[in-house]
Amino acid sequence: MTVWDGVQRGYIPAAELHIHESLRLHTGTADVDPVTFEVIRYSLMNINLEHGQTIQRLAVSPVTMITRDFQPSIITESGDLVFLGPYLQYFSNAQALTIKWVLENRSDNPGIEPGDMFVSNDPYVGTPHQPDTIVAAPVFAGDELFCWVANVLHHSDVGGSVMGSFCVDATDIFTDPPAFPPFKLVSRGEVRRDLEEMFLRQSRVPTNVHMDLRAAVSANRVATGRIVALVDRYGADAVKSVMNRVLDAGERTVAGRLAKIPDGRWSHRLYAEAAHTGDTGIYAYQITVRKQGGHLYVDNAGTDPQTGSINVTYAGFSGAFLAALTASLTADLAGAYGGVYRRVHFEPVPGTLSCADFPAAVSPAGIYTMETLISLSGAVIGKMLACAEPDVAALAIGPAHPVFYGLISGGVHPTGEPFVATNADNMIGSLAASPAGDGVDFGGHFWIPEGTASNIEELELLWPMLFLYRRALRAGAGGAGRFRGGRGMVEAGIPWTVPGMAAAVYMDESFPKAVGPFGGNPGSAGHFRLKYGTDVAGRFAGGEVPQDFDAVAGAEAEVEAKGPMLMMGADAAWEWTGANAPGFGDPLTRDPAAVRADIATGALPADLAELVYGVVPGDDATRALRAGRLAARLASAVPPAVAPATVPEDVPLRRLAGELAVAGRDGRPEVFASLTGRVVLAPATGNFKDGCAVLERPLPDVAPEFAIREGRAGHRTRYREYLCPVTGLRVDSEIIKEGDEALHDIEIGAGR
C-alpha cells in the first residue's frame, strides 16, 4: 500500500510524529502574566518581520527583493506554525510540512543539532514547486529543540528544460528541474560547500541563486539569534507558553466564526487549458468544503487525473486552500494562523491534478496550478461565507486570478553574461468584486499582501529590454457585475542593445477561467502577443513611442496557451496582459450611477455602458432597455422542469448573495429562492439550479472580448447562466466544458 510519505505520494504527517528518541524536544510551560505575554508575543512577531526584511535586503533577484516571492516563519518544535510574515501566504504550510518530514526522517541520520540548517525543494515533501526552496533552522534551548525558524524563497532558475524552471513541456518529474529532499546544508554553523555546489550546479544563473541562498541562510541566523536572546531573557518555558497560547487563540477565533456558519456543503469547479506544450485539452479542478460543527473537511473529488505539467502535490493543494481561508476568515490574526489549521481536515484524492503522485511533473505550478487552486478555494469559501451570519458573510473577498500572468524571458547581456528575466509586473494585480462592493484596480493579490511590481526603469537596468508602455486595462465585459472586478494591466516591450532573446514562459488564454460569483461576469483572459519584423525602430527615429500594439507593423505569431520557447530578434515586439478580476452579481443590476462614474474616470469606455450594463442616458430608458434584455434572456433560456412557485409575501427572505436567498422557519433555512422574483428554487438541501431557467451559449456570444481563435480549447467551453424564471436575473453562472453537468454547489444542512 502506498502511504503519504513524501516519496511515492505527497507527505501528510500523522497526528503523532515518529521522531528518534535521541532528539529531545522542549515542551515546558510556565504561567505568564498579561504584560509579559504581550511583550513576548510582539517580540516573536517582530523577529519574524525582521527575518523577512533581512531576506529582502540581502537577496539580489528581483523576484525576491521586489516581488517579495518569499516567506519567513516561526514554527514550534514539532512543526506547527506560530507566525508567518506578510509575504507569500501558502509558503507557511510548505515550511510546516517540510519540518515535520525532517523530524521524522532526519532526526536519527544525519541528526538535528544546534547550528544546523536543512534545505529542500522537493514538492512531494512540502514545497509547491522546485524553484521554491526551503531553508529550515532548528533553534535549541540547552540540549532541547525549542522551535524552528524557516524561510522559503523563489529562485530565478534551478534547472530543468526551460530557463526559469517552469517546464511546461515536462511529462514527468524526470524532465522537470531536480527535486532535492531535505539535506543538511549547514552543519553546526558551517555551510557544506559540497552540497551547496551540488545545488548551484543545476542553475543557469548560479551567482544569483548563490546570493539568494546565502541570504536565506543569513536571515535564519538573524532570527535564531533573536529567539535565543528572547529565551535567555524570559526563560524557555515562558516563551513556549506564549507560542502555545497564540496557537490556542487562533483556534478559538476561527471556532467562533465557524459557529456562525450553518453546517453544509459547498463546491466549486474551475477549468484549465493545455497540460503541456502542444496540448489543447481542457481539465477540471474541483474543491468541496463540508462544514460540520466546528470543523471544515476539504476534498478535491471531481478533479481530473494527473497529467502533463499542470499538477501539484498535496503540499500545494493544502497550502492554496489555507491561504484563501485565512485571508477570508481570519485575516485579522496577522499571520498567527497555526490554530486555524487545527480546524481544517483534508481528505485528498490522490493521483489527481491537485494532489499528484510521484512522478508527476509539477514545476509550472507556481504560475498555473497554485493560482488555479487559490482562485478555486476563494470561490468555494465565498459560497460558504454567503450562508453565514452577516458579520462573517461580510468577510468574503472573491476569487483571485486563476493563473499568475507574467513573462519569463532570457538570453545574454551585451557583456556575455546570461540572464533570466522573470517579469512579475502582474504583481500589480487586481482584486475581485465582493458582496460589499467593487474590486480594487491594481489592488495586488490577497495571497501575497506585501508583493509589489517593479518600476519599469528598474527592469530596464537589470535586463536588455525597453518598455513601450505599461497601463491599465479598460473595464468591459470581463469583470462586469453588480459590483465590478478590479482592473489589471497591459505591458509591451522590445529587446534592447542585444540581437535578440527568447520568451520561455508566457500565457495566452483562449477563454477566461475565473467565474464571477452569483451571476457576475468572468474576469478577462490573459493574452500574450508577439510580432516579428516590426517598425518600432523606425518610429523611434521619427520621435514616436508606439502605444497601440494593433498599429505596430509586423507579422504576428500564433501562440498557444502554453507554447514552446519563442525566439525574438532585435526587431520583435511583445505585449502581454494581466486580467480584470471577476465581477459579483448580475451586471444588469449595477447602479447606473456607478456605471456613469466609471465612464467619467476613464475606467469604462462610454460605448460599453449600453452593451455590458444596459445603461443609456435617462433612468427610464435604462430601465426599459434592461427589462428588454431580461425578457430576451428568458425567451432564449430553457425553463425549469417544474412550474415555479413563489414564497408568500408575508414570509421574509434572507439574501445570501446577489439574487440568491433563503426562506426558513425558526432560524433554519428551508428553501432557496430568488430574491427579486421570490421564486422557490429548491429545498435548502437540494440544488437551487434545478429551479432556474438555464441559458447556455458559447463564450464569444456573451461579449466580443471573449472571442476565440478557431481551433483553440475555448471553443469547447460554454457559458451557462442560471436565471430566475420570473425576472430573468442571473442567480449564478458557470463556465463549463461542453457536455458537463451542472455542479450542485451549495447544500445547507448537509453537514448535520
Image (cartoon, grey):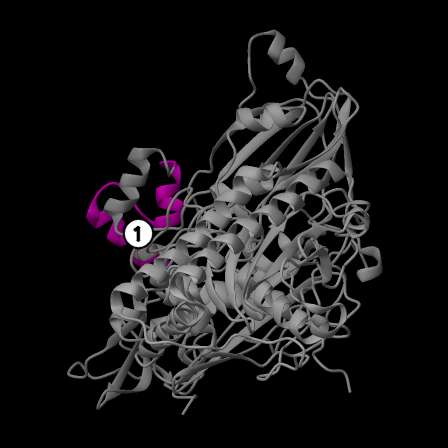
In the picture shown, does residue 534 fall above or below 394?
A: above
Main secondary structure of the magenta stretch: helix
Q: Which residues are magenta?
A: 605-629
Which of these two is toward me, 718 or 247? 247
Judged left or right of residue 634, residue 300 is: right
Tell me which amino acid carries mark 1.
Answer: Leu
Residue positioned most to the left: 650
Asked if residue 527 can be seen in this view, the reply is yes
Residue 65 lies in quadrant: top right
Residue positioned most to the right: 174
Position in image of residue 233 (x %, y %): 39, 60
Position in image of residue 241 (x %, y %): 40, 73
Q: Please give the name of the residue rendered at 50% of the width and 48% of the height, measured from the top-left corner.
A: 52
Position in image of residue 25 (x %, y %): 56, 75
Quarter of the C terminus within the rendering:
bottom left
In the picture shown, does residue 243 fall above or below 131?
A: below
Judged left or right of residue 644, residue 497 is: right
Does 625 lie within the magenta span? yes
Q: Please give the name of the residue rendered at 30% of the width and 62% of the height, measured from the top-left corner.
A: 38
Position in image of residue 122 (x %, y %): 72, 62
Residue hosting label 1: 625
Does 353 lie within the magenta span? no
- Number of numbered discs present? 1
In the picture shown, does residue 363 fall above or below 506?
A: below
Residue 110 lies in quadrant: bottom right
